[in-house]
Image: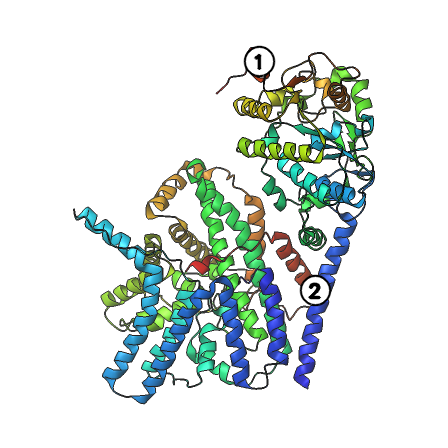
Amino acid sequence: MKTDKQILKFILRTKLFVIIFFGSIMIFNYIVDPYGVLRSHQNRHRATGINNHFVKIRHILRNKDKYDSFVMGASTAAKIDVRKIKNGRYYSISYSLSVPYESLQDIKLMLKKGVKIKNIIMGLEDLSYKEDPLLHFKQYRRFPYTENIKKNTAYIFKNLFLIHDINYYIKTIVNKKYRKNGFEYSTVYDIENTGLVFAPGLDEYIEKDSADYVKSEIFNKPRRLDRPQRIDKTIEEIKQICELANSENIHLVFYMSPIHHTTYMNINQKEFFLFKKKLADVTDYYDFSGLNSITTNNFYFYETSHFRFCVGDWIINKLFGSGFAPEDFGELVNKNNIAKHLAVQKEQLLNAGYVFE
Amino acid sequence: MLFNSVAFAVFLPVVFLLYWFVFQKSIKLRNFFLLIVSYVFYGWWDYRFLSLIFISSLVDYLVGINFEKTDLKAKRKILLIISLSVNLGFLGVFKYFNFFADNFTALFTSLGFNVHPRTINVILPVGISFYTFQTLSYTIDIYRKKFKPIKDFIAFFAFVSFFPQLVAGPIERASNLLPQFLENKKFDFDRARDGMRQILWGLFKKVVIADSCAVTVDYVFKNYTSLSGSALFFGVFFFAFQIYGDFSGYSDIAIGTAKLFGFSLMRNFNAPYLARDIGEFWRRWHISLSTWFRDYVFIPLGGNRCSKFKYIRNILITFTVSGIWHGANWTFVFWGFLNGVYYLPLIFTGKQKAHTNVIAENSILPGFKEFIQMSVTFLITLFAWLFFRAQSISQAFDYLSIMITKSIFEVPHVLNGVKNMMLVTVFMIVTWIHRKRDHELEISYMPVVLRWIIYFVLAAFVLYNFGGEKSFIYFQF
């Protein structure tokens, strides 16, 4: 009897410890919500990135009839203002380091869950064939929303009960604003309406003192992605997206994103040309990359990774053949003109001092 | 099943509840339950190798029974040879066969002969070196008439496969552990609570100290040709704490888990990096193995009750064999031999047992002499750890030649170096403060609020550093 009491006392104490320990972690995680998946984040100002991929797909599946058209792609695609596209009810499924493999899974999942898709605009760039999508399953910021409910639930549980990156916690709690040339700003995630990410005041600041802005040192640092290429796999995935779009009667448009000249001059162009060539064999696409009046002008970029909303507007105009877009910005590429197109781009690169390996 | 896994986090409470609430009705029933859950624990990794434990247990059980039936020396010797052959045979086949075959080939090739001995493609069964030595101690002790054979085969099988210490020790003696399977158990709250503390501390050592250091160590050993001498020094320095945290962490979890079930396992580590000479280091490091080699190799060879020459020979053989026990690689052989060489000055000066007391027993800090002694002992063990960690002897010397250059005085730039240094410092301070206690988290003397704060902090560190289920280094031995 005495022994039983002692065991029960031991069990109760252990239970108490476990409950208090994990309970306090859970409450803390729920309040801080470092990856933005535990609570709603409509228009929330944050200094740290949330898991856009997870929350956006979850939002679409919870609102199956709200959208019929999507802009897909990496974080640059978030600068395509979906409110300005008129041939559908658009939502931006843009997120950090998105790749075609994930877009393919997302489209399949949305169709399976009854989302009716009319249009898809998909942005591509060099990272599309460099980023390994399987790595995202290990990253809290990029873990995808999948068909597997168990996996999604496990992800939410991990967000609740594990202790995450301390720096990320601190940044989220402090919520210190970003700085650009002395200008401070936050990002705003509009998950529940457009899927866009805004930086209020930033464009006004850039335009107010553009002469100083374009000289900023941030434009001398290229965005780097030193990872092995997976061009053939990516092309195969894009092929599958095209086949799926065909069979589901989805209007699908691809474009190659504008890349800031500093980054562009630092990427492996041999690989990039190969990707563009193979892509043209699979589908037509608009190519906004290359050295043109937009990509060589710092004014049109936030840094060397992301172009500004005005550039996104010109991309829309070019894709839909209406409104203004700079003449040398973007060309429709297909398998007939790809060789000539690449020859021109190669010439531009050589003139700019790029050395091909 | 790994101690630092989700599976074990479920397994342990379930087994605990069933053990105390369902299977305490009889000793036999309880032992049978322990046997089954121990086999489940081991089989979780690879159920096929359960047959090896079963055969080992069966042979030694039968050998033990037959020992009792005869007093004939020749017959007893045959029985002992059967036990040694089966157990060391398994070890030889699974652990050393390819090593000897490769070296045999290399030797004959260098002599101009063309030989192609067969090698076998088999993985090393986890824990084979541990349970084999444990069960061998049983038959050897019976042969020496120091222990009486057991007739209860379930108790014996449970003793060989007892899950807390099955795969990485402590290597228990039959005389300590086996009688515990034959006695009634009563739950002891204080002991169980202390067991939980030791489990938590063991997890901290493994998940926080060892796994953090492992990242740096792997990085340094992978890139040693392009790093500075100081970075290479810290590569070995952090390895010393990786292997200590990893192995002693496992032992703490094992001992703590056993306490939950009312069992006492022997202490396996006792602040080895506070040792003042190499003799003291080996009385504090992997104690269960050191004493095993002392009792079953060193003493049978003649021990120290012989000429100085033979004493030195016995020491070198014992340390070299203990090196081979760790793995089938010349690096381990050299590591063992080197530790034997370290021991020789103690023999020459007759100071083998100069330091048996607790360091700085009546003071807060060590004296200057003690500090120097500790530092020198630590540095020579670091030198030996380099050979233990290297892939080959030539890599170790290569590493050494880069390390001992002017660049050893440069500011080291190693991955996570500052973070690891802070962790190791805190770890060593705790070890120093609690050097007289049974384990570093024996904090029953503290007020309850402080104790709970410590539990929370340690658990938070463990959870924060928990980057998946990383295996223990000593599983490979």
The x and y percentages for residue A237 are 60, 35
State which tag comes first along the sequence, 2 or 1.
2
How many discs mark residues in the rendered view? Answer: 2
Residue denoted by label 2: A18
Q: Mark 2–mark 1 contact, CB under 8 Å? A: no
Q: Name the element at disc 1.
A: helix
The x and y percentages for residue B312 are 27, 64
Residue denoted by label 1: A340
Left/right of residue B163 with respect to residue B376 in the rendered view? right
Q: Can residue B442 be seen in this view?
A: no
Amino acid type of the residue that numbered disc 2 sits on in the rendered structure:
Val
Q: In the image, are marks 2 and 1 on the same chain?
A: yes
**Quadrant in the rendering for residue B323:** bottom left
Determine whether A201 is above or below B169 in the image. above
Determine whether B465 is above or below B255 in the image. above
Observer-nearest of B230 and B197? B197
